[in-house]
C-alpha cells in the first residue's frame, strides 16, 4: 500500500519535471528561431560619443600606459626567459638522459653483439683448432707413414747398393790380390800343386844353396 | 866306401829307422848263418824290411857280398854318418806328400850332396813357397816374405785394377 502511494508520488514528480522541461525547451526553440534584441544590445549599437580629454591627461595616460606596457613586457620577457632557461635545462637533462639511455642501450646491444661475435669467433676458432689438430694428426700420420716407407725404400736401396759395392769391391780386391800375387810370386806359381814351382825355385837358387853348403862345410 | 842313401830315406828319423832295420836284419842274418853252419832246419823268416832298407841292402850287395861282417861295416858306416849328418831343413806351408818329398830329396842329392838328409817342417804362416835351412844359412823363398817385400806395390796394383 505504502509502496503504491510512493510510486504515485514519484510518478507525479516525474510528470511535473517533464512539463517543466518541455516548457523550457519550447522557449529556447522560440528564442532560437525568432531572436529579439535586448536593451543592452540596443544601447551598444548606438554610435559612440566622442570624449575630449586634456592633453596633460592624454600625455599622462600615454606615459602610464607605456610604463605599464614596458613593465608587462619586461615581466613577460623575464618570465619567458626563465621559462626558456628551465625548458632548456629540462631539455638538456632530458637529452642527457635520453642520450645516456640510448648510448647505454646501444652499448648494451654492442656488447651483446660483441659477446655474440666473440662466442661465434671462439667457436669458429675452436672448430678451426680442432680441424687443424685433426689435420695435423692426419698429416703427421701420413708423414710418418711416408717416412717409414721412404726409410724402408732407402734401406732397401742402400742394401742393394751396398751389395753391389761389396761385390764390386770383392771383385776388384780379388783381381787386385790375384794380380799382386801373380806379380809378386811370378807367373809360374800354382797355388794348388807346388811341386814344379818348388823344384824350379831350387833350380833358380841352386848356386846360393851350394855356396851356403860349401860355407858350412 | 861312400854311402848312398835311398831316396825314401830323407830325414834323420828315416836314417835311424834304417839303422834299426839293418841291425835287425844283420842279427837275423847272423843267426841264419849259424843255423846253416849247423844244418839246422827250423829257419826263421826274414824280418819285414822297408823299401828303403831293401834298396840299401841291394845297393850294398851290388858292391860287396853280404856277410855278417859287411853288414856290421854297413851299420858302422850308417852310425858314423848319423853322428854327423849333412842335414838340410825345408819348411813348407803344408804337409808334403811322398811324391813331393821324393822329388825334393832327389833334387838335393843330385845337386847338393849325394847323402844329404832332408827334413821337412810345416809352417802354414809361410802361405807357400819354402824356407831352406842348411846349418846357419837360411834361404827364405816363402810367399809370405815375397808378399811382405812387395806390399808397397799393392796400392799401385789396386789402382791399376
Image (cartoon, coloured by chain):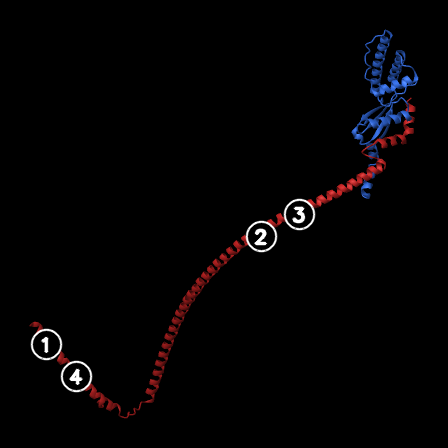
Chain colours: A red, B blue
Q: CA distance from mark 4 to mark 2?
A: 108 Å
Q: Which residue is mark 2?
A: A139
Q: Is residue A36 left or right of residue A123?
A: left
Q: Residues within 10 Å of mark 3 (few under 14, many from 20)?
A: some
Q: Which residue is mark 3?
A: A154
Q: Chain of mark 4?
A: A
Disc nearest the viewer among 4 and 2: 2
Q: Quadrant of residue A164?
A: top right
Q: Position of residue B84 (x, y in %)?
A: 88, 18
Q: Residues within 10 Å of mark 2 (few under 14, many from 20)?
A: few
Q: Which residue is mark 4?
A: A22
Residue A9 circle label: 1
Disc nearest the viewer among 3 and 1: 3
Disc nearest the viewer among 2 and 3: 3
Q: Secondary structure at mark 1?
A: helix
Q: Position of residue A110 (x, y in %)?
A: 46, 63
- Marks 3, 1 in one chain: yes
Amino acid at each position: 500500500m505504502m509502496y503504491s502511494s510512493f510510486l504515485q508520488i514519484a510518478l507525479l514528480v516525474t510528470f511535473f519535471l517533464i512539463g517543466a522541461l518541455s516548457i523550457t525547451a519550447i522557449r529556447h526553440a522560440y528564442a532560437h528561431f525568432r531572436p529579439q534584441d535586448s536593451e543592452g544590445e540596443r544601447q551598444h549599437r548606438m554610435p559612440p560619443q566622442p570624449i575630449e580629454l586634456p592633453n596633460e591627461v592624454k600625455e599622462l595616460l600615454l606615459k602610464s600606459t607605456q610604463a605599464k606596457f614596458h613593465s608587462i613586457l619586461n615581466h613577460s620577457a623575464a618570465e619567458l626567459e626563465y621559462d626558456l632557461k628551465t625548458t632548456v635545462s629540462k631539455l638538456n637533462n632530458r637529452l642527457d638522459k635520453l642520450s645516456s639511455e640510448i648510448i647505454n642501450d646501444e652499448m648494451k646491444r654492442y656488447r651483446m653483439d660483441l659477446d655474440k661475435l666473440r662466442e661465434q669467433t671462439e667457436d669458429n676458432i675452436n672448430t678451426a683448432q680442432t680441424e687443424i689438430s685433426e689435420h695435423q694428426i692426419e698429416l703427421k700420420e701420413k708423414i710418418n707413414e711416408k717416412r717409414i716407407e721412404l726409410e724402408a725404400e732407402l734401406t732397401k736401396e742402400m742394401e742393394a747398393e751396398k751389395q753391389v759395392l761389396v761385390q764390386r769391391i770383392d771383385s776388384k780386391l780379388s783381381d787386385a790380390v790375384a794380380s799382386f800375387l801373380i806379380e809378386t810370386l811370378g807367373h809360374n806359381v800354382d797355388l794348388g800343386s807346388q811341386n814344379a814351382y818348388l823344384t824350379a825355385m831350387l833350380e833358380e837358387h841352386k848356386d846360393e844353396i851350394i855356396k851356403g853348403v860349401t860355407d858350412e862345410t | 866306401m861312400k854311402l848312398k842313401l835311398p831316396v825314401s830315406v830323407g830325414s834323420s828319423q828315416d836314417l835311424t829307422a834304417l839303422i834299426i832295420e839293418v841291425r835287425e836284419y844283420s842279427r837275423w842274418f847272423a843267426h841264419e848263418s849259424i843255423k846253416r853252419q849247423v844244418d839246422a832246419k827250423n829257419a826263421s823268416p826274414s824280418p819285414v824290411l822297408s823299401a828303403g832298407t831293401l834298396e840299401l841292402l841291394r845297393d850294398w850287395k851290388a858292391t860287396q857280398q853280404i856277410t855278417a861282417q859287411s853288414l856290421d861295416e854297413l851299420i858302422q858306416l850308417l852310425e858314423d854318418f848319423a853322428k854327423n849328418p849333412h842335414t838340410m831343413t825345408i819348411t813348407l806351408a803344408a804337409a808334403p806328400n811322398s811324391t813331393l818329398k821324393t822329388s825334393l830329396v832327389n833334387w838335393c842329392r843330385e845337386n847338393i850332396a849325394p847323402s844329404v838328409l832332408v827334413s821337412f817342417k810345416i809352417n802354414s804362416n809361410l802361405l807357400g813357397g819354402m824356407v831352406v835351412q842348411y846349418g846357419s844359412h837360411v834361404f827364405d823363398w816363402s810367399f809370405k816374405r815375397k808378399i811382405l817385400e812387395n806390399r808397397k806395390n799393392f796400392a799401385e796394383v789396386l789402382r791399376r785394377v
